[in-house]
Image (spheres, helix red, strand yellow):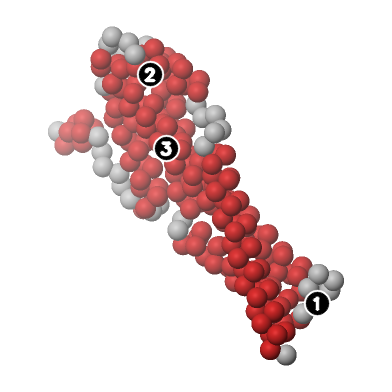
Amino acid sequence: MIERMSSSVGLRVLACILVLAVVTASTWWFLEERNTWPRGEALGDALRPVVEGKNSEQALVARAIWDNYLETRSNASRWSGVYWGFTFTAAVFSALAALILKLETFIKNEGAKKDLAALLSVTAALLITISSGGDFQRKWQANRIAAAELERTGYEFLENDGADARTYLATVGQSLLRRHMAIVGSSEQRNPPQEPGKAASQNK
């Protein structure tokens, strides 16, 4: 009797370790693979001559646009991977929990089946709770929108041949500000600070 209980406990511990190992390995592999996906190479190739050019003011602005674009795009990729990784893993665990209770060939011990199913269900619930509580989806979307805005700013900069280069820094700053506000809370509930020029004109 004692040997059977020890065997059952060992099986449960082994199952827990295997589940955690699979989740960790899958998440690590997915995030590493995402870092190799192409992101904005066309914009980078177009901005490179300006960055390496002799006009220091245009080079400064082009570098600011490109560096911030890379940062927001990388952040969007990471948060997207975390959010969807948690979501898909939770869905798989929930399905496995229901499937294990129906299996009769692989796991014949009813106690082990119920324990493993409960473990998977609780893990799935925790993943969803952490994902929702951490606002992973909102962080992903905020960075993705900011990256799209910065990409558009970069192409507008190139379209105008870098004329009045420093004026584009305000647009970059506004995109980053909207990203931060979207992460910490709804932008509709917060009034972003106005640009110095606009604020001064309204106070006259």
Position in image of residue 93 (x %, y %): 66, 63
Q: Residue at x 59, y 52 (%)?
A: 25
Give the side of residue 142 with respect to residue 33, left or right: left
In this orientation, which residue lies closer to the viewer: 136 or 122? Answer: 122
According to the picture, the residue beneath numbered tag 3 turns out to be 72
Category of crowding for the residue at label 1, using alpha-carbon neighbours closer than 10 angstroms: few (below 14), some (14–19), many (at least 20)? few
Q: Residue at x 52, y 65 (%)?
A: 129
- Going from N to C along the chain, the mark reached first, 3 or 2, is 3
- Going from N to C along the chain, the mark reached first, 1 or 2, is 1
Q: Amino acid at mark 2?
A: Phe
Local secondary structure at mark 3: helix
Checking the image for residue 108, the label placed there is 1
Tell me the mark number nearer the camera, choosing from 3 and 1.
Answer: 1
Query: Does residue 118 appear anywhere in the picture?
Result: no
Outermost residue to the top: 54
Give the side of residue 78 with respect to residue 64, left or right: right
According to the picture, the residue beneath numbered tag 2 turns out to be 157
Q: Amino acid at mark 3?
A: Thr
Q: Amino acid at mark 1?
A: Lys
